[in-house]
Image: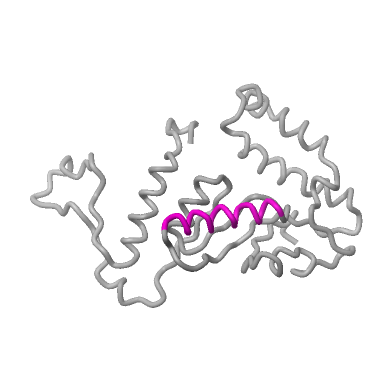
Amino acid sequence: MAHLGRAPHSVAEFENYLEQLQHYLSGNEVEFEDGSDLGSLGLADHSNSSLISWISRIEPKVPVDVAATGPRVIAAAARHADRISLNVGADIERVKWGMDVARDARAKAGIAGDIPFTAYISLVVHDDPEEAMRIGAGQVSLFARFSAMYGKSSVLHLNRNGKYLKEFTEHMTCNNMAEVKGPKNLLSLENLHVTSVFSVLRHIAWTGCQN
């Protein structure tokens, strides 16, 4: 967004938007944001709010799924979303951490019951672990780049010319890349463990190629 001259919304702004979106999708009237420029259109009259009059009759409600990595966004999603898609890698303890953050946020907000979870996991299935690492390295480095967006300026500078991503890729090992491994070309949810141990109901698998 910086290349477009805009900064990302803060977590507080995002959470407010998320709350308003849920009201809107539930058939409630939502007021326009302060500073709306509708007056510049020269209309004879205009509303200061909006609602979808028919949507409250739709069952089930349109679900809101939030993809989250950090604790504040995970907590905001836990308070207002219908599902959380955790983008924290394939490490089981890291996934468990994200789920614990969400559940703790719901408990503190007085929200009963659990929330469905999704896990984003990069998977490359290949007979040769080294080749699998090579195929998946670019994708993993991209995830790392976004994780470091707001970190040290030296890292951001290296990102601009691609040097950081190249160095990161060169230093990755099979163990770094494959927290979850199965026999050769066989991969099942049992291999992932996450489903059976932590009740992740859905996985989004980013593959190494289109085939």
What x and y, as percent, mark residue 59?
A: 39, 77
Q: Residue at x 32, y 61 (%)?
A: 23
The residue lying at 84 percent from left, 47 percent from top is: 175
Which colour scheme appears in the figure? Answer: one colour
Residue 191 % position (x, y): 80, 66
The x and y percentages for residue 158 are: 68, 25
Residue in the foreground of this view, choosing between 131 and 60: 60
Q: Is residue 191 left or right of residue 71?
A: right
Question: Quick one: 29 or 194, which is closer to the camera?
Answer: 194
Where residue 40 sits, quadrant-wise, is: top left
| Residue depicted at x 78% and y 37% | 169
Q: Is residue 196 magenta?
A: no
* Residue 167 vs residue 4, the one in the foreground: 167
Q: Quadrant of residue 41?
A: top left
Q: Main secondary structure of the magenta part?
A: helix
With 119 as the anchor, is 72 left or right in this view? Answer: left
Up/down of 188 relative to 136, above or below: below
- In the image, residue 134 lies at what x, y percent? 83, 46
Is residue 19 found left or right of 1 in the rendered image? left
How many numbered marks have been drawn onto this rendered protein structure?
Answer: 0
User: Over which residues does the magenta segment extend?
Assistant: 93-109
The answer to whether residue 34 is above or below residue 46 is above
Considering the image in quadrants, where does the C terminus appear?
bottom right
Residue positioned most to the left: 44
Q: Residue at the location (87% across, 50% down)? A: 131
